[in-house]
Image (cartoon, helix red, strand yellow):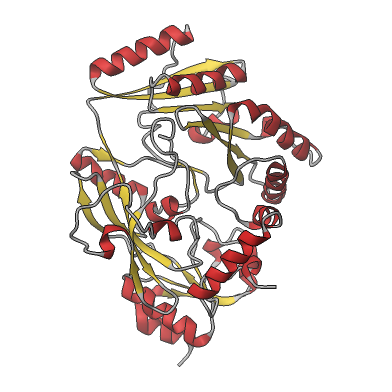
Amino acid sequence: MSIDERLKHVVGDGDVLSDISPYFREPVTSSKLRVVFPHTAEDVQSILGLAVDLGLPIFTTSDTCFPKPILSEEGILVDFKKMNKIERVDPVNLMVHVQRGVTFEDLGEDLKKYNIKLAPPVAATSHSVVEQYTKKIVSLRGARYPETIVPTNMLVVLSDGRIQRTGSHAISEEAADVQIEMGPFLSYWYFGSDDIFGIVVRASIPVFPMWEERRTLAFAFDNAQEAWGLIRELPRRELCIEATVLDRMGFAGLLGREDGLPSWIAIIGLEGRKKLVDYQERMILERVNKKALDLSGLDGLLDRPWYAIDYPHLGFYTTFNRILEFDKVVDDTIKSEGYSMGDIGRKLISVSYGGGVFCEYDFPTDERAWELAGEVEVRLVERGAFFDRLQGKIAEATYSRMPDNLNLIRKIKKMMDPQNVLNPQELLQEG
């Protein structure tokens, strides 16, 4: 029996495909990869068992496309879109329990019935709720709440086919759930690990109540530093939930147009009791001393994901006083390739009550820009930019300075996945 026939025996005839072109940016001429669509955790267990028996790698993704080097591999790509069940909504404990294939759009619509909502991510690279939150992506609500939403109660398929449950579900799936996991913090083992230790197929996600009043204020600025100062100050004074600044190109990426847009725009989100929001708006208008922009037609801008699926981008954390320094690093790197900062979209998300900022740079969509973004990342790492998810060139650049950390990760990988079938990476191979 062939590999494809054995996979079809597990998931069904229509859930094994040889056409992998939708999963790569590069043209696909021939490949020994195939795509499978599991429906249940048991399907994933069977697929993994088959991969171990045959010595084939399994590739899962937290992004829309797989990296180019995988094209030369023989193995199995796993697409979780058919594991799309919303298992339980818990409006009392403000938690939702969802399978990996559930999308932001589907879950967001369902949560409206309970008057609760998600904290939408910035620079989301897929529509999967579980994938995006487990990759440590930053939240738009990072000015007031934790900048990363940590999933808990994970259901993880290990390389030997066993199931591991984390959080309170390690004891009982009927237990009361809390947003912050108590020890031994097993969910953090898989938080940001990109399925190299085990495949996360279900998780519980913290959600937030919809308050009596919700408002969005926007202000135009010609001076970038004046705009940055605003989103640093307002969270420190507890006058907002979200505080973001975008340049013309960054905002155009959200709108799909750039005509008539200001050089910089600050977008401030308020919510709470009406009296509180009235007070916050009054204080903000006094501080800014200018009229707010009309955002009609942009309802829900701060309550939906900001996707970065179709273009190269990078994002890192820093302090406000270093933004100009890192802007210069980006400018010096891209101008040698014929680009200017006018070609780059910039989004700044205030985090930790204005104590820090997440900086996103959006590049043009041409092929050279995809490679250039990686080169810029390495230059930024060398200057001290903090990337919370290490991949590709920045992983090599970072771990070259921390060989003991890399050796520890390699040992854990070998312990958890002795046959190296879960998202194998050259960097994690012992030298």
Residue furthest right as drawn: 336
Instruction: Please indicate whether residue 151 sits to the left or right of residue 90 in the image.
Output: right
Instruction: Please indicate whether residue 11 sits to the left or right of residue 77 in the image.
Output: left
Q: Is residue 261 in view?
A: no
Residue furthest bottom as drawn: 1
Q: Position of residue 328 (x, y in %)?
A: 73, 31
Q: Where does the N terminus fall, quadrant-wise?
A: bottom left
Q: Residue at x 74, y 37 (%)?
A: 339
Q: Position of residue 31 (x, y in %)?
A: 60, 75
Relative height, residue 217 to residue 104 (above, below): above
Residue 298 lies in quadrant:
top left
Q: Is residue 158 in view?
A: yes
Relative height, residue 366 to residue 328 (above, below): below
Q: Position of residue 278 (x, y in %)?
A: 29, 14
Relative height, residue 307 to residue 141 (above, below): below
Relative height, residue 411 to residue 25 (above, below): below
Residue 191 lies in quadrant:
bottom left
